[in-house]
Structure formats: structure tokens, C-alpha cells
Amino acid sequence: MNWGAFLVGMLPEHILLGGLLLLIVQAIVSDSPRGPAAASIVIVAGAALAALWLAVTGVQAVPFPGQVSVTPAVSYGKAIALALALPVLLLARDDLGDGGPLYPLLVSSLYGLALMLSSDSFLTLFLGLELLSLPVYAMVLLGLKRESSPEAALKYLVLGGAATATFLMGVSLLYGQSGTLALSTFSKALGSPYSLAVGGCALVLLAFFLKAAIVPFHAWAPDAYDGASIPVTAYMAAVVKAGVLLAAVRLVAEAPLSPVITGLLTALPLLSIVWGNLAAMKQPGLRRMLAYSSIAHAGYLFLAFLGTGPQRHGALLFYLLVYGLMTVLALAAVPADADDGRRDRLELLQGLYQRQPFAAIVLGLAMLSLAGIPPLPGFVAKFVIFREVMAAGHTAVAVAGLVGSYLGLYFYLRVIQLTFMGPQPQAAVGALPMRSAAWAAAWLCLLPLLVLTFLPGWVLARL
Amino acid sequence: MSEALALQVVLWLPLAGMLAIAAVPAGAPGRVRAIAFWVMVLQFVLTAWLYARFDAAATGVQFATRVPWIAEWGVYFSIGLDGYNVLLVLLTGFLGPLVVAGSFTAVDKELKLFYAMVLLIQFAMMGTFLAQDLFVFYVFWETMLIPMFLLIGIWGGPRRIYATLKFVLYTAFGSILMLAALIYLVYAANQAGVDSYAIADLYRLKLPPDVQAWLFAAFALSFAIKVPMFPLHTWLPDAHVEAPTTGSVILAGVLLKMGTYGFIKLGFPLFPAATLQFASWILVLSVASIVIGACLALVQDDIKKIIAYSSISHLGYVMLGLISLDLIGIQGAIVQMVSHGLTAAGLFLVVGMIYERCHTRELAAYGGLAKLVPLYSVAFMILTLASIGLPTTSGFTGEFLVLLGAFRSAWGQHLGGDSFALVPTVVAVTGVVLGALYMLRFAASFLFGPSRAPVARLADVNRREASILAALIAAIFWLGLFPDEPMRKTEAAAREMQQLVTAARGTSVQAGSTR
């Protein structure tokens, strides 16, 4: 172990771990309702800043050779994922009050994410992945205001378990083939024609498809997104997805792909784009709709894996940042109401603009950006992805993906149609003003949105 | 003030106006209207000054600004005036204050959002015309969708949701294919050593004909939907009928020029070999648009639909002029674009004025307005005659030059042994007769005969409305009587486009037949 690299390179992890202990102690000694929320915001912000500092100063460190290493690209990934958790924490203060065990769970999940992103072996990766996922199963249950929550949590748990099993199966095949657990075996195996290697890679990829909700492994997502409370939905959509995708891109690295793997990375993401966008049209609630939207977006993100250029990592980071911000923004704008199940029904958004212009405009911006309409940053994000795919020579795939993205336009526009053009609903629902923390969360997403809209080049040059 | 800076101000002013409107407290409608109006006036003054300063003798982009935007890929935020856009920028700037002034009494709900959207679409339209970088062009091109979606969807008629979704989903489908083609084009340019999104750089690209054909098909589909050309025109009547007057005026005045502008600025010069390959198709579809648009206009009962279908017919002329690839034809097409912008915007404004008073667009509900509202009727008649293309009006200059160019081109091809183009060109002339027929049928039952109006006391145009119409009519006569000066400013660009396309003749499929 290298002490200097350990202390500096893993600074975000240390902050998160120290903060986690602090939160647990605080829960024992104090019963202030606001304490944990404020403390966890400070902890996560500190960790995100530490990661950003590591990235900007270009720190390269190997705290545990063969297990954990840190590069600026990794640190940028951590900084973005951790920063996306900040508006989620603000939302949580509104929705869950003192939050119960939410804050320690969320911080430990973030610890797993940070560990996973800098892992160098399957062992650390697995540790991080489980540490990321296990708290989320419990977090889904926290918003237990409806009968569907436990069912959603169970579904999520069982399918998450299946993903874990698939992952381990794949890793054991790869270990059997190469005799080592280093992550580099995966990228080597990707181009290999041996069936053992291909099988191992395919199983590991499928596990990531399950975690990222790629069709046909997507069925848990709508239920989990819908059954959880709104901040937990935002966490799953923005942060967990970012973590899973960044871990996957670390795995795939810049290795050449064998035809089978290329087929896998083409067919299922395309299917996700088409099915996610089609199914989203019929959803009655905003969160189920966003779940299908996230399935489609996972499709775009995995298509980027076909690209082999050095800019792919930056493209993915940019996309994840924009996608995460927009999803949290949309969820922050959902009008306050008695319970989560009622809050996000699409018909309750009718005439939102007349009641709460700010919330309606914010929601509209989020929808247009998710739909990828310029000048909003969702467009540049989509552009970088398809530019990568096209540059890798997969012209037909890129065209199919773009046409698939067209299918998504309708349901995003439908939200705008309801909020701006719909008649006022009969009952006085959703009339409560946006709560202060949700308002703060919306601004926390809007300001980066402005930077990403007007200066996408400045951001892209740094990722 | 330097010209380049003034051009920047022209572009960004509406956005600044939007922010100013957002800052106005609710319940001050007068201030919102005033901000929107004066922003537009200032923008027009600046565009007029820039138009005057535009040097007709120089080639290339003038008053350009070029700032790195996504420097990594070679995307520059690059804008400037050139022969392609100079008249259209002037038209956009000119219609801006008229659009705002025309909506003062028509709109009463969500005033702030309304003027914010009018300014946003003005910003996006200016940006689309001024863009000299393909990426920037696409960003502005798509940005136009959002404000139009809201303008029709919030302030439109009873079937507004259907109409606005149809409009957006139609145009966005073309756009997504254009995006795919754009990404591929820049990737191909990159392979060929042109690491740039600058449109002028991409002109120099020599792509193989089969690649050009695919890319052109995608760009052309997107532009043809926007024009709109037959058979992709079905969104237009719905959008026009359901849109509020302001929306119709913007749509007819400027937005419908986007498709033809796309062809002249990008579609034809970027893919010359493909243009020649598809020229006969475009010719036939242009003529189909002219004739079918005119025939459909002949049988409508809804006033707005008549003008909507007449737009399809008039834009068919623009396409006919462009595809003739004859200098006179191209010049005529540009004039026809501006002329249609003026007359169609004017016609939608006068229809909006009568609709504001009577709340019906049923043609049968009106008659003999010449006796009831004489001043209004004079303006209406002048706009109608300009739309038909009576000499001394702008419509004549445009249509005449287009037909002249089309005949010169068709006859030239005939002498070269290819007589295909003669038939559609002759058929196109019937459009002139049909145009006179539907517009005069409209005017006759509207203005003359026994007096009939849905309301008992019909007020004539007030001073605000009279000023708007007077400005439009003055512009129509200016372009009709003195087309020489504006056409000198567009000549260099028209010649450039013609040369870029015809230079590919040697390599195209049609090479044998035209030589």
C-alpha cells in the first residue's frame, strides 16, 4: 500500500467514509430533524469538491496497486456523480423530512460508487457495485406511503440479485480463462474469439445491462422508479445510472470488440431506445414515464461504447451530467401534494403554468433537453454520442438510433402540452407552491444548465 | 459602431428583450408590449442600416464574427451577412415590429409568455439565416420549433393541440434525418482533411456521388417538409388555420422561407452532383406544388386555408426558380421568397383583422366589404393583386423572373437534346392563371357583391392597423418598382450557387444528356 497515494488519491472516499461515521454517531447522540440533511449535504459537497480538485490538478495515484487507481478521468466521473447527488439531497429534505436512515444509506451508497469507479480488479469493482446497490434497495422502501413500495423494492432486490449472480458468473468464466481478476482481462477478452472469453464478457455486460435497465432487462425500472419516493427516484435515475455506466466504460476501456460483443452492444441498446420511447408514450405518471425515458437514454449511452475514439469517455461524462441534471430538474418541478402516488400523475400537471409558472418552465426545459432539442444541452449530449458512433463506422446504427430518438419526442412534448396548453383541472390539486428546498434543487440544476447551453465547448474540452 | 458588432446586436437583441420581459411584473401589459415593439423596431433599424452598408460588389461573408464554440471539434459560433441571407434578414427585421404591432389587441392571455416566444422565434430565425457554421445553423433551425409549438398550442384555435403536434412531429422528423446526415457529412469532411463545420469550407468538399445522394436526400427531405413541397405539405394548412394571427404571419412571412433558404444555402451547393441527379424530381414536385396548391386553394371555404394553400403554390415557384439553376431563375426565386413573405404576411394580417372583429373565417359569411370598410378593402385588394403578381408589385418581379429562368433553362436543355424539363415548365405557367383565379374568386366574394358581415357594425381599420398595412404595401411596391438594387446584392451569391452546382455537371449522371 502506498500511503501518500492512499491519503490524497482517495480523498473523496475518505470524506464520504468519515462523514458516514459522523452521521451514524449523530443519529445516536442527537435527534435534531435538520441535522443529518445539512451534514450530508456538506459531506457530499466536500467529497465532490475533493474529486473535482483531484481531476483539475491532474492527480494520478495508485493507492492499492492492482486494486485501486485514480486518474483525472476517474476523478471527473466521481465529481459529476457526487455533484448530481446534491440536488437529490435537497429534494430529500422536502420529501422525507428528517429522512430517517436515508442520509447514511445514501452516503454509503455514494462511497460504493466512488470505490467502484476507481477499481482496478473485479474484486474491488464487485465490492463497490454491491455497496452502491444494497442501500438503494432499502432506500426504495423509505417512501413507504403506498402498497406498491415493498413490491417495487422486492422486485428491484431480486433483479439486482440476478444481476449480481450474472456478474459473478461472467467473472468466474473470465478468471477461468485468464487466471487473474484484473479488470484488463475483460478488455482483452472483448476482442477474443474464444467462447469462454466471449461468454464471460457477455455475462458481465448483461449484468450491467440489467443494472442500467436495458431492454429486455428493464422491467424492474418503472416499478422501482414509481414505487420509491421522488428523491430516491432521482437518485436511481441520475446517480446510480451514472455510476453503472462509468464503471462499464472503465471495463470496456478502448479495446477492440469482437463481432458477438459488437452485436450485443448494438442490438439491445437500439431495442431499448425504440421500446423505451414507445412505452413511455402510454405511461400515466411522470415517474413511470421518466423510467422508460431512462431506459431509452441508457440505450444511447451504451451505443457510445461502439465508439473507440479518445473522446468517448468525455462524451459519456457529458451525457451523464446533462441527463442526470435534467432528470433531477424534472422531478424537482413536480408540484408538492399529499403523497407521491398522486403527485406525479400526468393529468395533475394540467395547467401547471397558470398556477406555478416557474415549475412549469423548469419542467418544460427539462423535457426539451431530455428530448434533445437544441439549444438545450441534451442536444449536444446526443450529438457527441452519435458523433462517436458515426466516427466508429457504424453509420446505420447511428441513423437507427437517431430515428429511435425521434419516437421519444412525442411524450416529452406531451408534458409541455399538458403544463402549458391543458385546461385547469377541476379539483384544486397540486396547488401548493414549490417547497424551498425543491426550489433550491431546481436552481442548483438550472445554473449548470445555462453553462452547458452556452458554453458546451468549454465543458467538453475539460472532460 | 462597427458592422460586425451591429450584426451581433441584431441577433442577440430579441433574447435580451425576452429577459427584459421576464423581469416585468405581472399586470403591466403595456410595458410588455412596449418592450417587444421597441426591441423589434431597434432590430429593424439596425438590419436596414446593415443592408445599406452591405457591399454588393464583394463576394463572401460580410460583417462576420467567428468565435470558437466547441473548439475541440472545430465548431465556431460564426455569423455574417452574405448574398444568400441579406434580403431575408432584412425581411425578418422588417416584419418583426409589424408582427408585434399586429398582435396588440389580438392577444390577451399569458401576455408575457406570448411576447417572450415571439422574441425567441425572432432570435432563432435571425440566427438560422445568419449562421455560417453548419452546427450553429442546425441549432438555430431546431430552436425555431419550440416557440412555434407554444405559439400555436397556447394561443391557437380549437384544434390547436392537434395542429401544433402535427407541425412539430412533421418538421422534427425531417430534422432528425438531417442531423444524421450532418454528423456523417462532417465525419466525411474530417476524413477528407476538412476539419471544420464552416459552410464555406464544406462547399469545397468533393464527396462521391452515391454519398452525396444519401446526404442530399436527408437534407432535402427536411427542407422540403419545411417549404412545404407537395406531398409533404399537409401540416401547413392545419398549422395556419389553428395558429393565432401572429403565428400565421411569422409562419408565412419568415418560417416558410427556411426550407427554400436551406436548399439555396446548403442543399444544392453542398451536394451538387446529387442536386443534378435529383433535379428532374425536384422540378416535377415544384410544379406539382404550384398546380396542386393552386387547385386546392380554389376550393377552400376557410379564408386562412385559401392563403395557406396559396403559400404552397407560391413557394413552388421559388423551388422552380432555384432548380432551374439559371442565374435569372435563382435571382427570381430569392425575390419571390421576399415577395411571398410580404404578401402572405400581409394577407394573414388583414384576415386576422377581420377575424378579430367578426370571429369567423367562413368565406361565405362575408360579402361586399368594399362598401362597409373601404380602407380595409383597398389594402386587401393591393395585397391580393401583389399575390397574383400584377406588374409593379413584388409578386410580378419574382414570378416573372422565375418563369423566365425556368424557360431559359428548359430550352437550353431542349437544345442539348433533353426535352424533359419543357413539359413541367409549361405546366407551371398555368399556375399563374390558377393563382389569379383563386385569389380573384376570394376577393370577389369577399369585397364585392351584396354587403354581408357577421356583425352589425364593422369598423374600418384603425390608425395602428392602417400603419402596419401601409408599411407592408410600401415594401411590396419598393420591391416591385426597384428590384434592381436588392438583386445586385444577391447576385454574387446566386452566381456562386449556380457555379457550385453546375461545376459538378461533368461528374454527374446526367452529364451525357446536358452536354
Image (cartoon, rainbow, N blue to C red):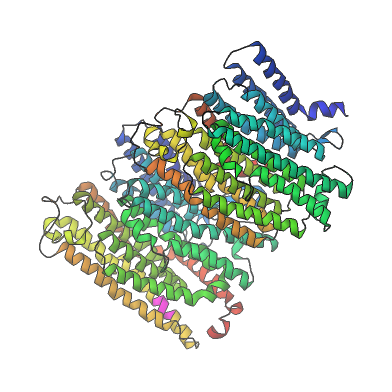
Which is more toward the observer, A63 or A178? A178
| Vertical placement of residue A415 versus A336, above or below | below
Q: Tell whether A133 sits left or right of A324.
A: right
- Residue A204 x %, y %: 75, 47
The residue located at (39%, 53%) in the rendering is: B92
Q: Which residues are magenta?
A: B404-408
Q: Would you say residue B406 sits in the magenta stretch?
A: yes
Q: Position of residue A456 (x, y in %)?
A: 60, 43
Q: Is residue B211 left or right of residue A344?
A: right
- Foreground: A334 or B498? A334
Q: Is residue A109 magenta?
A: no
On the image, the x and y values in percent for residue B241 come to 31, 56
Could one spot residue A376 in this view of the protein?
Answer: yes
Q: Residue at x 85, y 26 (%)?
A: A4
Q: Quadrant of residue A48?
A: top right
Point 48% across, 40% down: residue:
A285
Prevailing secondary structure class for the magenta stretch in the rendered image: helix
The quadrant the C terminus of chain A occupies is top right
Residue B139 visible (yes or no) = no
- Answer left or right for B425 relative to B60: left
> Where B218 sits versus B24, above or below?
below
Look at the image and tell me in which quarter the N terminus of chain A lies.
top right
Please name the residue shown 68% across and 39% down the image.
A160
The residue at the far top in this view is: A29
Q: How many marks?
A: 0
Q: Position of residue B195 (x, y in %)?
A: 67, 57
Instruction: Name the foreground residue: A134 vs A447.
Output: A134
